[in-house]
Image: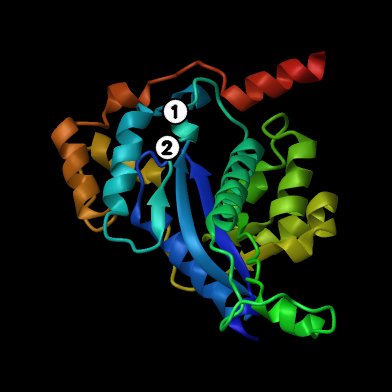
Protein backbone atom coordinates (compact mmCIF):
# COMPACT_ATOMS: atom_id res chain seq x y z
CA UNK A 1 0.00 0.00 0.00
CA UNK A 2 1.36 3.39 -0.94
CA UNK A 3 2.12 5.82 1.87
CA UNK A 4 -0.50 8.26 0.51
CA UNK A 5 -3.21 5.65 0.97
CA UNK A 6 -2.43 5.04 4.60
CA UNK A 7 -4.40 6.75 7.35
CA UNK A 8 -2.26 9.09 9.40
CA UNK A 9 -2.75 8.65 13.13
CA UNK A 10 -2.03 10.76 16.19
CA UNK A 11 -1.72 8.79 19.43
CA UNK A 12 -3.21 10.57 22.46
CA UNK A 13 -2.48 9.33 25.97
CA UNK A 14 -4.51 10.85 28.79
CA UNK A 15 -3.83 10.17 32.45
CA UNK A 16 -2.30 11.34 35.69
CA UNK A 17 1.37 10.72 34.79
CA UNK A 18 2.04 10.90 38.51
CA UNK A 19 4.91 10.57 37.73
CA UNK A 20 5.55 9.65 34.11
CA UNK A 21 7.50 6.38 33.83
CA UNK A 22 9.50 4.52 31.21
CA UNK A 23 6.46 2.29 30.69
CA UNK A 24 4.38 5.28 29.63
CA UNK A 25 6.96 6.05 26.98
CA UNK A 26 7.12 2.41 25.90
CA UNK A 27 3.37 2.46 25.24
CA UNK A 28 3.94 4.97 22.46
CA UNK A 29 6.73 2.96 20.85
CA UNK A 30 4.75 -0.30 21.03
CA UNK A 31 1.63 1.32 19.58
CA UNK A 32 3.58 3.02 16.80
CA UNK A 33 5.29 -0.22 15.78
CA UNK A 34 1.97 -2.06 15.76
CA UNK A 35 -0.01 0.53 13.83
CA UNK A 36 2.72 1.09 11.24
CA UNK A 37 3.09 -2.67 10.95
CA UNK A 38 -0.52 -3.14 9.87
CA UNK A 39 0.28 -1.45 6.55
CA UNK A 40 -2.92 0.62 6.91
CA UNK A 41 -1.73 3.39 9.23
CA UNK A 42 1.16 5.79 9.67
CA UNK A 43 1.69 7.24 13.14
CA UNK A 44 2.77 10.86 12.74
CA UNK A 45 2.65 12.14 16.31
CA UNK A 46 2.21 11.16 19.93
CA UNK A 47 0.63 13.45 22.54
CA UNK A 48 0.86 13.16 26.33
CA UNK A 49 -1.99 15.01 28.03
CA UNK A 50 -1.70 15.11 31.84
CA UNK A 51 -5.01 15.45 33.66
CA UNK A 52 -5.79 18.65 35.55
CA UNK A 53 -5.78 19.05 39.32
CA UNK A 54 -9.58 19.09 39.37
CA UNK A 55 -9.55 15.32 38.75
CA UNK A 56 -9.04 15.04 42.53
CA UNK A 57 -7.32 11.67 42.50
CA UNK A 58 -5.73 10.63 45.77
CA UNK A 59 -2.00 11.37 45.80
CA UNK A 60 -2.19 13.55 42.68
CA UNK A 61 0.51 16.23 42.89
CA UNK A 62 0.03 19.61 41.11
CA UNK A 63 -0.24 19.48 37.32
CA UNK A 64 2.57 22.01 37.05
CA UNK A 65 5.09 19.41 38.24
CA UNK A 66 3.55 16.53 36.28
CA UNK A 67 3.68 18.51 33.04
CA UNK A 68 7.32 19.49 33.57
CA UNK A 69 8.27 15.87 34.26
CA UNK A 70 6.49 14.75 31.09
CA UNK A 71 8.31 17.44 29.11
CA UNK A 72 11.64 16.30 30.55
CA UNK A 73 10.80 12.68 29.69
CA UNK A 74 10.07 13.53 26.05
CA UNK A 75 12.85 16.07 25.65
CA UNK A 76 14.76 13.89 23.19
CA UNK A 77 11.76 12.41 21.40
CA UNK A 78 11.31 13.30 17.74
CA UNK A 79 7.60 12.53 17.66
CA UNK A 80 6.07 12.47 21.18
CA UNK A 81 5.17 15.80 22.74
CA UNK A 82 3.34 17.12 25.80
CA UNK A 83 0.15 19.15 25.53
CA UNK A 84 -0.94 21.34 28.46
CA UNK A 85 -4.53 22.16 27.43
CA UNK A 86 -6.20 19.53 29.62
CA UNK A 87 -3.96 20.21 32.61
CA UNK A 88 -4.77 23.94 32.53
CA UNK A 89 -8.56 23.52 32.67
CA UNK A 90 -10.15 24.70 35.92
CA UNK A 91 -12.69 21.88 35.78
CA UNK A 92 -12.01 18.24 35.01
CA UNK A 93 -12.53 17.43 31.33
CA UNK A 94 -13.90 14.10 30.13
CA UNK A 95 -11.56 12.07 27.93
CA UNK A 96 -14.05 12.37 25.06
CA UNK A 97 -13.75 16.18 25.20
CA UNK A 98 -9.96 15.95 25.18
CA UNK A 99 -10.06 13.71 22.10
CA UNK A 100 -12.47 16.10 20.41
CA UNK A 101 -10.27 19.09 21.26
CA UNK A 102 -7.22 17.57 19.61
CA UNK A 103 -9.13 16.35 16.54
CA UNK A 104 -10.65 19.80 16.02
CA UNK A 105 -7.23 21.38 16.52
CA UNK A 106 -5.81 19.20 13.75
CA UNK A 107 -8.73 20.02 11.45
CA UNK A 108 -8.36 23.76 12.09
CA UNK A 109 -4.63 23.57 11.40
CA UNK A 110 -5.26 21.68 8.17
CA UNK A 111 -7.84 24.25 7.09
CA UNK A 112 -5.40 27.12 7.71
CA UNK A 113 -2.71 25.28 5.78
CA UNK A 114 -4.96 24.82 2.75
CA UNK A 115 -6.03 28.47 2.78
CA UNK A 116 -2.41 29.61 2.89
CA UNK A 117 -1.22 27.17 0.22
CA UNK A 118 -0.29 28.85 -3.10
CA UNK A 119 -2.49 28.02 -6.09
CA UNK A 120 -0.70 25.96 -8.70
CA UNK A 121 -0.69 27.50 -12.15
CA UNK A 122 -0.28 25.72 -15.44
CA UNK A 123 3.38 25.97 -16.43
CA UNK A 124 4.32 27.85 -19.61
CA UNK A 125 2.73 30.81 -21.36
CA UNK A 126 -0.50 32.01 -19.76
CA UNK A 127 -3.55 31.74 -21.99
CA UNK A 128 -7.25 31.15 -21.64
CA UNK A 129 -8.28 27.60 -20.84
CA UNK A 130 -10.59 26.08 -23.43
CA UNK A 131 -13.54 23.87 -22.66
CA UNK A 132 -12.10 21.20 -24.89
CA UNK A 133 -9.18 20.58 -22.57
CA UNK A 134 -9.05 17.22 -20.89
CA UNK A 135 -10.67 17.46 -17.45
CA UNK A 136 -8.21 14.95 -16.06
CA UNK A 137 -5.38 17.28 -17.07
CA UNK A 138 -7.02 20.10 -15.14
CA UNK A 139 -7.44 17.88 -12.15
CA UNK A 140 -3.78 16.90 -12.18
CA UNK A 141 -2.79 20.54 -11.83
CA UNK A 142 -4.84 21.00 -8.67
CA UNK A 143 -3.12 20.41 -5.32
CA UNK A 144 -4.20 17.16 -3.70
CA UNK A 145 -6.05 17.60 -0.43
CA UNK A 146 -4.34 15.58 2.28
CA UNK A 147 -6.61 13.86 4.79
CA UNK A 148 -6.51 15.15 8.36
CA UNK A 149 -4.78 12.71 10.75
CA UNK A 150 -7.09 10.72 13.02
CA UNK A 151 -6.69 11.01 16.78
CA UNK A 152 -6.85 7.69 18.62
CA UNK A 153 -6.74 7.06 22.35
CA UNK A 154 -3.66 5.19 23.53
CA UNK A 155 -4.14 3.30 26.78
CA UNK A 156 -3.33 0.27 28.87
CA UNK A 157 -5.73 -2.61 29.37
CA UNK A 158 -6.57 -1.23 32.81
CA UNK A 159 -8.38 1.68 31.16
CA UNK A 160 -10.52 -0.77 29.21
CA UNK A 161 -11.47 -2.50 32.44
CA UNK A 162 -12.29 0.83 34.07
CA UNK A 163 -15.19 1.16 31.62
CA UNK A 164 -17.01 -1.33 33.85
CA UNK A 165 -16.66 0.78 37.02
CA UNK A 166 -20.11 2.25 37.81
CA UNK A 167 -20.35 6.01 37.18
CA UNK A 168 -16.68 6.35 36.25
CA UNK A 169 -17.59 6.73 32.57
CA UNK A 170 -20.75 7.84 30.80
CA UNK A 171 -21.99 5.03 28.56
CA UNK A 172 -22.49 7.48 25.68
CA UNK A 173 -18.89 8.68 26.07
CA UNK A 174 -17.57 5.14 25.82
CA UNK A 175 -19.61 4.58 22.67
CA UNK A 176 -18.36 7.78 21.02
CA UNK A 177 -14.74 7.10 21.97
CA UNK A 178 -14.64 3.63 20.44
CA UNK A 179 -16.91 4.46 17.49
CA UNK A 180 -15.59 7.87 16.42
CA UNK A 181 -11.97 7.78 17.53
CA UNK A 182 -10.81 4.29 18.43
CA UNK A 183 -8.53 2.71 21.01
CA UNK A 184 -5.02 1.37 20.86
CA UNK A 185 -4.77 -0.78 23.95
CA UNK A 186 -1.41 -2.13 25.11
CA UNK A 187 -1.88 -5.15 27.35
CA UNK A 188 -0.19 -5.35 30.72
CA UNK A 189 0.62 -8.38 32.82
CA UNK A 190 -2.54 -9.81 34.39
CA UNK A 191 -4.96 -8.14 31.95
CA UNK A 192 -7.11 -9.95 29.40
CA UNK A 193 -8.22 -7.19 27.04
CA UNK A 194 -9.76 -9.50 24.43
CA UNK A 195 -11.94 -11.19 27.05
CA UNK A 196 -13.12 -7.82 28.34
CA UNK A 197 -14.00 -6.69 24.80
CA UNK A 198 -15.94 -9.91 24.28
CA UNK A 199 -17.93 -9.36 27.49
CA UNK A 200 -18.92 -5.78 26.56
CA UNK A 201 -21.62 -5.32 23.92
CA UNK A 202 -20.44 -1.80 23.07
CA UNK A 203 -16.78 -2.75 22.75
CA UNK A 204 -17.65 -5.87 20.78
CA UNK A 205 -19.77 -3.87 18.35
CA UNK A 206 -16.85 -1.53 17.62
CA UNK A 207 -14.06 -4.11 18.03
CA UNK A 208 -12.70 -3.29 14.56
CA UNK A 209 -11.76 0.14 15.94
CA UNK A 210 -10.00 -1.31 18.99
CA UNK A 211 -6.42 -2.39 18.42
CA UNK A 212 -5.00 -4.67 21.10
CA UNK A 213 -1.20 -4.63 21.24
CA UNK A 214 0.59 -7.39 23.11
CA UNK A 215 3.62 -6.42 25.16
CA UNK A 216 5.72 -9.56 24.98
CA UNK A 217 8.52 -8.13 27.11
CA UNK A 218 6.95 -8.12 30.57
CA UNK A 219 7.03 -4.65 32.11
CA UNK A 220 4.94 -3.95 35.17
CA UNK A 221 6.25 -0.49 36.01
CA UNK A 222 3.51 1.78 37.33
CA UNK A 223 3.31 5.25 38.82
CA UNK A 224 1.80 3.77 41.98
CA UNK A 225 4.85 1.54 42.51
CA UNK A 226 7.19 4.44 41.79
CA UNK A 227 5.51 6.57 44.47
CA UNK A 228 5.61 3.67 46.93
CA UNK A 229 9.34 3.21 46.37
CA UNK A 230 9.95 6.93 46.86
CA UNK A 231 7.98 6.97 50.12
CA UNK A 232 10.17 4.14 51.36
CA UNK A 233 13.40 5.79 50.32
CA UNK A 234 14.11 3.20 47.61
CA UNK A 235 15.79 3.81 44.27
CA UNK A 236 13.69 4.44 41.16
CA UNK A 237 16.63 4.63 38.80
CA UNK A 238 15.98 3.01 35.38
CA UNK A 239 12.23 3.03 36.11
CA UNK A 240 11.81 6.67 35.09
CA UNK A 241 13.95 8.83 32.78
CA UNK A 242 17.04 10.24 34.54
CA UNK A 243 15.85 13.84 34.15
CA UNK A 244 12.54 12.93 35.80
CA UNK A 245 14.33 11.27 38.70
CA UNK A 246 16.50 14.34 39.18
CA UNK A 247 13.46 16.64 39.13
CA UNK A 248 11.61 14.49 41.69
CA UNK A 249 14.60 14.49 44.04
CA UNK A 250 15.24 18.20 43.60
CA UNK A 251 11.66 19.12 44.55
CA UNK A 252 11.04 16.23 46.97
CA UNK A 253 7.74 15.59 45.20
CA UNK A 254 6.53 12.29 46.62
CA UNK A 255 6.11 11.52 50.30
CA UNK A 256 3.55 10.18 52.75
CA UNK A 257 2.11 13.69 52.93
CA UNK A 258 1.71 14.01 49.16
CA UNK A 259 0.07 10.58 48.99
CA UNK A 260 -2.66 11.85 51.33
CA UNK A 261 -3.45 14.70 48.96
CA UNK A 262 -7.20 14.56 48.04
CA UNK A 263 -7.73 11.80 50.60
CA UNK A 264 -11.45 11.41 51.28
CA UNK A 265 -12.36 13.48 48.20
CA UNK A 266 -14.63 11.85 45.64
CA UNK A 267 -13.00 11.43 42.22
CA UNK A 268 -14.31 14.13 39.84
CA UNK A 269 -15.91 11.79 37.25
CA UNK A 270 -17.59 9.71 39.96
CA UNK A 271 -18.99 12.82 41.60
CA UNK A 272 -20.21 14.41 38.37
CA UNK A 273 -21.67 11.26 36.81
CA UNK A 274 -23.37 10.19 40.05
CA UNK A 275 -25.02 13.61 40.41
CA UNK A 276 -26.14 13.61 36.78
CA UNK A 277 -27.60 10.12 37.16
CA UNK A 278 -29.81 11.38 39.99
CA UNK A 279 -31.26 14.24 37.94
Point 69% across, 53% down: residue? 181
- Whether tag 1 and tag 2 are in contact, CB under 8 A, the answer is yes
The C terminus lies in quadrant: top right
Locate residue 72, reporting x and y percent: 26, 48
Quadrant in the rendering for residue 87: top left
The N terminus lies in quadrant: bottom right
**Which residue ends up furthest to the left in the rendered image?**
250
Kindly identify which residue carries mark 1.
88
Point 29% across, 42% down: residue? 69
Tag 2's secondary structure?
loop
Closest to the observer, 105 or 37: 105
Locate residue 140, reporting x and y percent: 69, 80
Tag 1's secondary structure?
helix
Locate residue 19, reporting x and y percent: 34, 41
Point 78% across, 37% down: residue? 171
Which coloring applies here?
Answer: rainbow
Q: Is residue 140 above or below residue 65?
A: below
Point 61% across, 51% down: residue? 111
Give residue 84's mark. 2
Quadrant in the rendering for residue 123: bottom right
Q: Is residue 40 above or below residue 104?
A: below
Amino acid sequence: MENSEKTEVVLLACGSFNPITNMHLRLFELAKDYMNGTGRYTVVKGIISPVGDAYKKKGLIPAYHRVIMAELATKNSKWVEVDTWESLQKEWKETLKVLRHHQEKLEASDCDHQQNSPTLERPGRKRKWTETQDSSQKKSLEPKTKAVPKVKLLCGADLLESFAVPNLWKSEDITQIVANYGLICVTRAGNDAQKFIYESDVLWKHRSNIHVVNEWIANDISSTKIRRALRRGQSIRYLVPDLVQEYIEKHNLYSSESEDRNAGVILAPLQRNTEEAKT
